[in-house]
Image (cartoon, grey):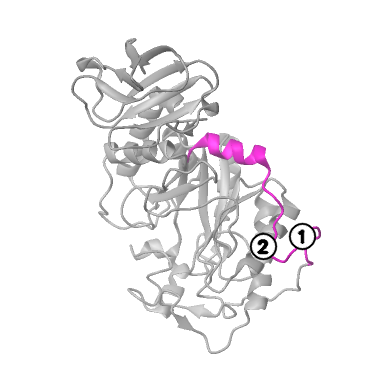
Amino acid sequence: MSCLSLVSFPVIAGASSETDISPVQPEAMRKWQDARFGMFIHWGPVSLTGQEIGWSRGAQTPVAEYDALYKKFDPVKFNADEWVKAAKDAGMKYIVLTTKHHDGFCLWDTKQTDYNIMNTPFKRDVVRELAEACTQGGIGFGAYYSTCDWFHPDFPQTSPGGKVTRETHDLDRYTEYLKAQTKELLTNYGPLLTLWYDVPQRFDAKRGAGIINLARSIQPDILINNRTGHGGDYDTPEQRIGGFQMARPWETCMTICQQWAWKPDDKMKSLKECIHVLVRTVGNNGNLLFNVGPQPDGAIEGRQIEQLKEIGAWLAKNSASVYGTRGGPWKPSPLMLSTRKDSKIYLHFLNKVEGTISIPALPVGIKSARVLNGPDIKTATAGGLLSIEIPPDSWDDIDTIVELTVEGNTMDIHEV
């Protein structure tokens, strides 16, 4: 396979230092945060092995064998519309696809390398089909792109796990390759919601800023995560829920099963676990990018499809407490978490509490209180505490949500 080198791109004008980036557009960030819930998709020829994408190269699967998997990759059941439907059925508002993982294989018709989907038996541009399906389905589309590339001869590190240093390499030339592919994705498959880079390894803040500024010169409203070597626009805690954070946007990425790529009979999270991950993430003021790994034939496992539908059914009833909200004003505790928007606060109780619930009082008046999808309830404020009593028959097995309507805008309330 050939990896073509390209001419250098010009330095982006307007930066006062080599690590400065063009600022994120506030409206683009607001819309992304309002969405709150997206689908991550890790997929490629590696699914033929049932091993982890990228990381199994040179570990569970010998390098030569791994790199030849594309010759047998023919996912005849891939249907972009079905992937989009699965995301929408789950209540997800955007999709992020691994267009190129650490293994260097590209799921689009890139002109920078022959190591791509068009040279498989399948010969269809997966990125194009999914981008178009997302547009038609009315949800956002983002591109995951691995900053490191353990296949590319110019990248300094290689498999297993990026722990081996190549004797010869050219990081500057690889950077131009990365920028050329970034330009392809933005120009030919955009507009994109986000560019989701990963594992920068040898990339520092200067190189990362160059990537971000190039991307913004093509699509000014693009959102870029914190894994180019530069801090980017938002943080990305992985396989864990991020801490409560209002000052900087963030997104937890987590798997519905255990492995990112498809694995036969992989242990799947229960519906309750999935909902709790979502509401705990939103209560901490983050987005959730929830991963599925399609099978080698291109279809998403039936059990995962059904789980996604159940998540969507829950969200259809409780959407007001998730979409468009921000975390707080109460910081999450073992007792509860809270979300808010406009004049509404949503208290999420993930475990049943017997009797009266007492929490720190709000600095504003409460106009009404009710169990979401249930009866009105009474509240009382005294001695710096807010007392709430939820009727015994109104508790939900997964998440009991109390909606408070308060005086003024809840975003004006400091955390309590």
Q: x, y (%) of residue 39?
A: 46, 44
Q: Determine the residue positioned at 51% across, 15% down.
A: 407
Q: CA distance from mark 1 to mark 2?
A: 10 Å
Badge 2 marks a residue whose secondary structure is helix
Question: Would you say residue 78 is visible in this rendering?
Answer: no
The answer to whether residue 330 is above or below residue 302 is above
Q: Determine the residue positioned at 56% across, 35% down.
A: 137
Query: Which contiguous range is marked in magenta?
Result: 10-37
Q: x, y (%) of residue 215?
A: 69, 56
> Badge 1 local density, few (<14 within 10 Å), some, or many (20+)?
few
Inspect the magenta stretch and tell me whether residue 25 lies in it.
yes
Q: Which residue is mark 1?
A: 15
> Badge 2 local density, few (<14 within 10 Å), some, or many (20+)?
many
Q: Which residue is mark 2?
A: 209
Classify the position of the C terminus by image quarter.
top left
Which-is-in-front pick, marks 1 and 2?
A: 1
**Looking at this view, is 8 or 263 the one in front?**
8
Q: x, y (%) of residue 287?
A: 47, 42
Residue 14 sits in which quadrant?
A: bottom right
